[in-house]
Image: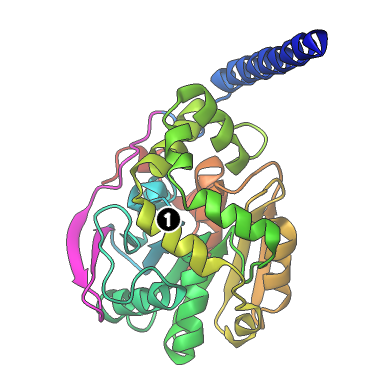
Amino acid sequence: MALLGVAAVSAVAGVIVGVRAAEARALARWEDNPDPTLGEPTTLVGEETTITTRDGGSLHVVSAGQGPVAVLAHGITANVDEWAPVAKRLVAAGVRVVAYDERGHGRSRPGSGGCTLEALGTDLLDVLAIVAPRDAILVGHSMGGIAILSALDQAPDVVNQCRGVALVATVARARDDRFTRLQVRVVSSELPPRLMSNERHGRVLARSGYGDSPSVAMLDGTRRNWMTTPTATRAGFIRAMRGFDLLEVVSRLTCPAVVVCGDRDKVTPLAENEAIAARLPNGTIDVVAGAGHVIIKEQPDRVAQDVLRLAGHDLAAAPPNAWASTT
């Protein structure tokens, strides 16, 4: 028995050493990966305002540029700065961007409605009513895409008055089984931010959100998002998304639309994006090879170009690297 115990301990130690070695090798590779936004501002700078939601919450809004309006809704644990790479390109090409922190994220606060999918939709409708009630381009990444579908479910006439909709790396439904319930419990706990605070473990965990070649700067950005988002916000939205189904709502989206997704997305898989695109009455899908879930950082040119097509603009017409200094 003693020998078996020693053998077991040795085996566990070997596994730990092997895992650490694998992490070290992975981290070394990521250090060498180029960052497509290297040298560009990582903060979205512009005019800052606050919108009061219908349930008494507050939304922090940042606006920049001139031209057709693009309203940008980010994903869970993110904030307006997540849009900086795409927003800079849109502004440079003649589009006015309006990005807002979703309730409970960044500098926004939830109202009495809490962190629900319905509240996500009403928040977007509240933003639209103020910044561009008729001809905005709606752009939603991940949970931001769900916000658009929730708004469509509640007010299809309002959403379909928009110039276009871009659903970026998102889903319209989620399972509710034993495995997903376990995921919800883990993600809703204090464990993820604690793990993300460890540089090595956090980068390894953040890696699942990216495609072929994430940079360390991208991974650290994801780590910061997880560490700074309140647990109550993260838990509320994760629970709200368990078992939701808005797939049939997609068929009500009659304005021009595009689904943008990476073929390496492990968070909102390609098949789910294809399911959305198949139900769009007036839409297309753009599948980006090698990109993962955080495609707005991995492929900002591609995402911006898809949005600009909805606006009737072209990224190629913008001055070279104009976004690098645009505020």
Q: Position of residue 81 (x, y in %)?
A: 35, 47
In this picture, residue 9 sits left or right of residue 55? right
Q: Position of residue 324 (x, y in %)?
A: 35, 37
Residue 292 visible? The answer is: yes
Q: Position of residue 26 (x, y in %)?
A: 64, 21
Magenta-highlighted residues: 39-63
Identify whether 27 is placed above or below 202: above
Residue position marked by numbered label 1 in the rendering: 234
Q: Give the residue at x 63% y 52%.
A: 267
Q: Position of residue 5 (x, y in %)?
A: 76, 14
Q: Relative to the observer, which residue lies in front, 120 or 141?
A: 120
User: In which quadrant of the rendered image does the N terminus lie?
Assistant: top right
Q: Relative to the observer, which residue lies in front, 234 or 170?
A: 234
Image-quadrant location for residue 135: bottom left
Identify whether 219 is placed above or below 163: above
Q: Give the residue at x 40% y 72%.
A: 120
Image-quadrant location for residue 179: bottom right
Identify whether 80 is placed above or below 249: above
Image-quadrant location for residue 129: bottom left
Badge 1 marks a residue whose secondary structure is helix
The residue at the far bottom in this view is 157
Which three-letter amino acid code belongs to the residue tagged 1? Arg
52 drawn magenta: yes
